Amino acid sequence: MKIRFAQYGISHDHASGKAKTLKANDDVDFVGVYEPSAEVRETLGGNEAYEGVHWLSSAEEILEDETIAGVAVQGHVSRNLEYARAAVERGKHVWLDKPAGDDLETFRAVLDIAREKGLCVQLGYMFRYSPGFQFVLDWANSGRLGDIFSIRGRISTRRSDAASWERWDSRGEREGGIMFILACHLIDIIVAILGRPERAAFFSQNLDNTFPWFQDNTASVLEYPDAMVTLESTASEVSSGATRRLEVYGTRGSVILEPLEPPALRLCLDEDRDGFVKGWQRVEVEHRPRYIDSLRALVADIRGEKAPDRSLDHEFTVQETVLRAVGLL
């Protein structure tokens, strides 16, 4: 039987991509979209992703329909926890886009309700199912790289769309800036490797005076008992996709993923093993579109075909670490 899904909100940067994915999944019956703002629907609702979708007239059409099992929460980050809480309170699984707001206790409450009701809450971190990142996670967590002592990440953009910037209205987006908005994707992976950091430090600048409230040149340092993580994110970089990268260094080898999409991997080993040679070499990995495998996994979780690949505790630790990495905790 197909899983009936609705989408709540369209103002998130990932909203149109999630709608396309919901429409294309053969195991999903995409019921429709509710956008609470008439202005947002007017400006963003014309995207081709929403062609042919049914526009719902109220949130209650989602929340009161017991046949709708899942809700893709895709509104403003400042409002998404409100939407997610309403959904889990009505017994619905949630595909919640990132980051999970900027109020950690509210997010904790959402997860507690989900845990009590046996519901899934999957955060919209789009790299989790990328073959490149899966290779990194497998080698780091299996011990094949030895003890991990250093991780470096860079993920930047170049934004010129004033309307997009002005939609970023949460405290996290405005005070944490591009680190909060973008580097959270890498923090999700880092937490999956190293867990919760002991300490975090945040450094930020504003380079574009058009938006004096926006921290658009940022760096964070996460400290672990035996490892150090440095993260960089800016909103001013030319051709930034080519330099998005994650570097993981261990006592028996290293792996560098650059760019992140399409993934290009280099692996270095201390000796010939595991089908690879000593020293640096390229590793071919598949490139798959965003979101598709995330939704497939969520559908399987809802059906009880497998356990979620990320626990609710992981989702909480990622969000806590994101807030600590931008100085909000």
Image (cartoon, grey):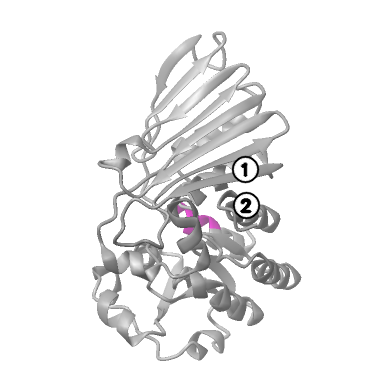
| Residue 145 at x, y percent in the picture | 60, 22
Residue range of the region highlighted in magenta in the rendering: 293-297
- Seen in the picture, residue 132 relative to 61 is either above or below; the reply is above
User: How many numbered tags mark residues here?
Assistant: 2
Q: Nearer the viewer, mark 1 or mark 2?
A: 2
In the image, what residue occupies the spot 55% across and 85% down?
A: 63
- Dot 1: element: helix
Most common secondary structure along the magenta stretch = helix
Q: Nearer the viewer, residue 89 or 329?
A: 329
| 158 left or right, relative to 21 | left
Residue 232 in sight in this render: yes
Residue 147 percent coordinates (x, y): 67, 24
Amino acid type at mark 1: Ala
Is 295 one of the magenta-colored residues?
Answer: yes
* Res 13 quadrant in image: bottom left
Type of amino acid under label 2: Arg
Is 291 part of what is drawn in magenta? no
Q: Which residue is mark 1?
A: 192
Residue drawn 33% across the image and 79% down it: 40
Q: Which mark is residue 324?
A: 2
Mark 2 nearby-residue class (10 Å; few <14, some 14–19, many ≥20):
many
Callout 1 crowding tier (Cα within 10 Å): few <14, some 14–19, many ≥20:
some
Residue at the spot 50% in from the left edge and 72% down from the top edge: 78
Of labels 1 and 2, earlier in sequence is: 1
How far apart marks 1 and 2 lie (CA) works out to 16 Å
User: Which residue lies most toward the right here?
Assistant: 116
Q: Residue at x 50, y 39 (%)?
A: 231
Residue 51: give x, y in percent of width and height.
25, 75
Does the image show residue 2? no
- Return the residue nearer the eye: 276 or 85: 85
291 in relation to 67, above or below: above
